[in-house]
Image (spheres, grey):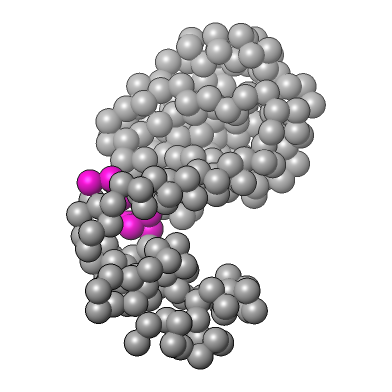
Amino acid sequence: MAITDWPASERPREKLLQRGPATLSDAELLAIFLRTGVKGKSAVDLARELLSDFGGLRPLLTATEEEFCLPLGLGSAKYALLQAVLEMGRRHLAQGLQRGDALNNPQATQQYLQAQLRDRDYEVFACLFLDNQNRVIRYQELFRGTIDAAAVYPREVVKQALAEGAAAVILAHNHPSGVAEPSVADRAITERLQQALNIMDIRVLDHLVVGDGHCVSFAQRGWL
């Protein structure tokens, strides 16, 4: 049966408009994105099959173009649309971290950094550079590594902080394993960075380790 033949209250689009997006299942949300199904399958049926094949919504959303386009005739145009939707979501989170905005919401900062770093399959070390009022100057990814580690050079971090005119920084990096628990090496490099930046009167406000749906704050653990 086509979705248009369903009762209005059960159609994903009408349900979203009447009750809000939070009331929809993953399959219903994906069906709205897909818009149409394929021969013999409604958009909801197709969405359920995709979620089953990929193992959930997140693996589907983070699939490569080749992986996304292979099943059930999904094409590059649909993949491009998906990437645009995801990027709009990331930029929505970034609105609270615009240049000149003061960081007064640690949760929003963590959400932004999670959105930037969580789904990388390699380690990335990044910095939020702040002025003396803790207003955002710039977010920058400084180092990229393998799936195990990123080589972080304190001199380069200090150099970039001075170039940005930063009075403070928030350090961040991801763990591709998904486990956010900081390692001994993470604590050691944080100490080295803190010492190097302190020489130039640049404060380290926090170091956030991003995992899969979780973020560990050095400041909250009293390690800074």
Q: Say above or below: 13 vs 207.
A: below
Residue found farthest to the right? 133
Q: Say above or below: 195 vs 104.
A: above
Q: Quadrant of the C terminus?
A: top right
Residue found farthest to the left? 70
**203 left or right of 46 in image:** right
**Image coordinates for residue 10, horizontal then vertical, percent:** 50, 86
Q: Residue drawn at (75%, 41%), measured in percent from left and top?
A: 104
Q: Residue drawn at (51%, 90%), measured in percent from left and top?
A: 7
Q: Residue drawn at (42%, 51%), measured in percent from left and top?
A: 82
Q: Nearer the viewer, residue 93 or 118?
A: 93
**Image coordinates for residue 163, horizontal then vertical, percent:** 61, 9
Span shown in magenta: 58-66
Quadrant of the image occupied by residue 151: top left
Q: Nearer the viewer, residue 27 or 136?
A: 27
Q: Nearer the viewer, residue 113 or 195?
A: 113
